[in-house]
Image: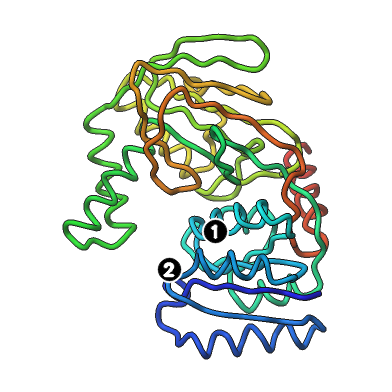
């Protein structure tokens, strides 16, 4: 296949490497597997334009290397151009890569993808903006806002800033009142710390990062935090760290094809695939089944099915 590869040279995994060295490594790896490769590695400011150009180059697959924000933008461009999409996980969380069973090291990811296959996955939308993982209002969005303030004003690194933002946000005990209108006809007013809308359902894993066993179920999953106290929030985060969050009695879950979030506020902060945005209300969520064709390792579905069987047993 013909691959158009665009990598963000400022992604965490590439910060200490020369772009020319990375381009050479990636080109050789995929060429050796029989692919035609056009590979570039550019700074963050140039990634968007480079991906647009790559997507219109006539390639079979647009492959993007970067963190979750770069991956989200690349997927949007692939959707717009009707091209298949691949990813090299070079960021911190690499959420979609985990769910596609793509190894998180560059060498392993290339080896797994080189013999990979293309299949469709669902795409979720907030109004007209696509997202691949989740969109969160309330607590987590506020944490991201506080984290970015610390990084910009004090030069803190990402994870120390996130830790302090978590402490500060829980201490302030923020609450948000919204009305949820679900596709099944249910309407409910909730006083909450957080509403998370996921593209397909999350499952407990073997660590603090939840995962999705399916990316093609055709449903959104809504997670509503109904915790009333700071201690309740602390317990939620402890359960998340222990991967036991499904046992939280104050976490309400709905699986729907569409939902609308109404608020008395004209705008709400929303963390969309980890990137903070300010969005005008109401927030309308929907899911488009099988809209994005993704390149993933052979056997990824088997791995997920095996994990599901182990939990069921």
164 and 290: which one is in front? Answer: 290
Q: Residue at x 53, y 27 (%)?
A: 223
Tell me the quadrant of the picture where the C terminus can be found. top right
- Colour scheme of the rendered structure: rainbow
Q: Which residue is drawn at 66% across and 23% down?
A: 256
Helix, strand or loop at label 1? It is: loop
Instruction: Give the image location of residue 73, x and y in percent.
Output: 54, 55
Vertical order, 75 against 283 (above or below): below
Q: How many labels does the image show?
A: 2
Give the spatial CA distance, label 1 vs label 2.
17 Å
1 and 214: which one is in front? Answer: 1
Instruction: Give the image location of residue 67, x and y in percent.
Output: 50, 62
Helix, strand or loop at label 2? It is: helix
Which residue in the structure is indicated by mark 1? Answer: 94
Which residue in the structure is indicated by mark 2? Answer: 44
261 and 247: which one is in front? Answer: 261
Instruction: Give the image location of residue 278, x and y in percent.
Output: 37, 37
């Amino acid at each position: 296949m013909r691959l158009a590869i665009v990598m963000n040279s400022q992604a965490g995994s590439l910060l200490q490497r020369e772009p020319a060295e990375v381009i050479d490594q990636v080109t050789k790896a995929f060429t050796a597997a029989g692919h035609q490769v056009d590979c570039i590695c550019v700074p963050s400011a140039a990634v968007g334009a480079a991906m647009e150009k790559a997507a219109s180059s006539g390639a079979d697959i647009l492959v993007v290397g970067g963190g979750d924000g770069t991956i989200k933008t690349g997927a949007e461009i692939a959707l717009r151009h009707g091209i298949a999409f691949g990813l090299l996980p070079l960021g911190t969380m690499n959420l979609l890569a985990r769910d596609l069973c793509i190894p998180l090291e560059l060498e392993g990811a290339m080896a797994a993808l080189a013999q990979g296959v293309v299949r469709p996955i669902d795409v979720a939308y907030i109004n007209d903006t696509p997202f691949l993982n989740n969109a969160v209002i309330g607590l987590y969005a506020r944490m991201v806002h506080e984290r970015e303030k610390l990084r910009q004003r004090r030069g803190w690194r990402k994870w120390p800033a996130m830790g302090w933002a978590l402490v500060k946000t829980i201490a302030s005990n923020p609450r948000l009142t919204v009305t949820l209108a679900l596709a099944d006809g249910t309407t409910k007013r909730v006083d909450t710390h957080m509403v998370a809308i996921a593209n397909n359902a999350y499952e407990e894993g073997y660590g603090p990062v939840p995962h999705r066993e399916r990316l093609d179920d055709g449903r959104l999953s809504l997670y509503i935090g109904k915790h009333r106290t700071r201690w309740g929030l602390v317990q939620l985060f402890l359960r998340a760290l222990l991967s036991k969050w499904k046992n939280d009695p104050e976490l309400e879950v709905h699986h729907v094809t569409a939902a609308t979030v109404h608020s008395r506020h004209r705008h709400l902060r929303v963390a969309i695939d980890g990137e903070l945005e300010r969005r005008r209300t109401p927030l309308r969520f929907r899911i488009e089944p099988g809209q994005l064709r993704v390149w993933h390792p052979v056997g990824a579905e088997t791995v997920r099915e095996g994990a599901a069987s182990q939990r069921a047993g």
